[in-house]
Image (spheres, rainbow, N blue to C red):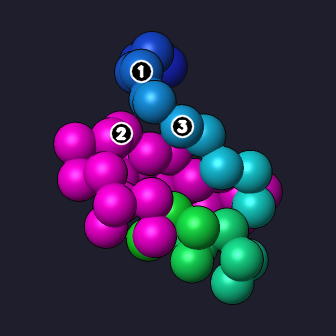
Amino acid sequence: MNKIEESDTIIIGASLAGSCLARQLKLKHPDMKITVLDKKINIKLQ
């Protein structure tokens, strides 16, 4: 069963650019919930 979770930001694509963006956002806004979606992986940063 799929679980619905909330995120403040969703980044599409876990390439170098997407991963760096997620890292920069998390460093600047530690409380932000970030989800990175890619066709091969799914990363949830809380």
The amino acid type of the residue labelled 1 equals: Glu
The amino acid type of the residue labelled 2 equals: Lys
Q: Considering depth in this image, is 35 or 30 the residue closer to the camera?
A: 30
Q: CA distance from mark 2 to mark 1?
A: 8 Å
Q: Give the crowd class for mark 2: few <14, some 14-19, many >=20 residues within 10 Å.
A: some
Residue 8, image x, y percentages: 45, 30
Q: Are marks 3 and 2 in contact (CB under 8 Å)?
A: yes
Q: Considering depth in this image, is 24 or 1 the residue closer to the camera?
A: 24
Q: Can the viewer see residue 29? A: yes
Residue that badge 3 annotates: 9
Q: Which residues are magenta?
A: 24-46
Q: CA distance from mark 3 to mark 2?
A: 7 Å
Check the image and report above or below for 45 versus 9.
below
Q: Is residue 38 magenta?
A: yes
Residue that badge 2 annotates: 33
Residue that badge 1 annotates: 6
Q: Are marks 2 and 1 in contact (CB under 8 Å)?
A: yes
The amino acid type of the residue labelled 3 equals: Thr
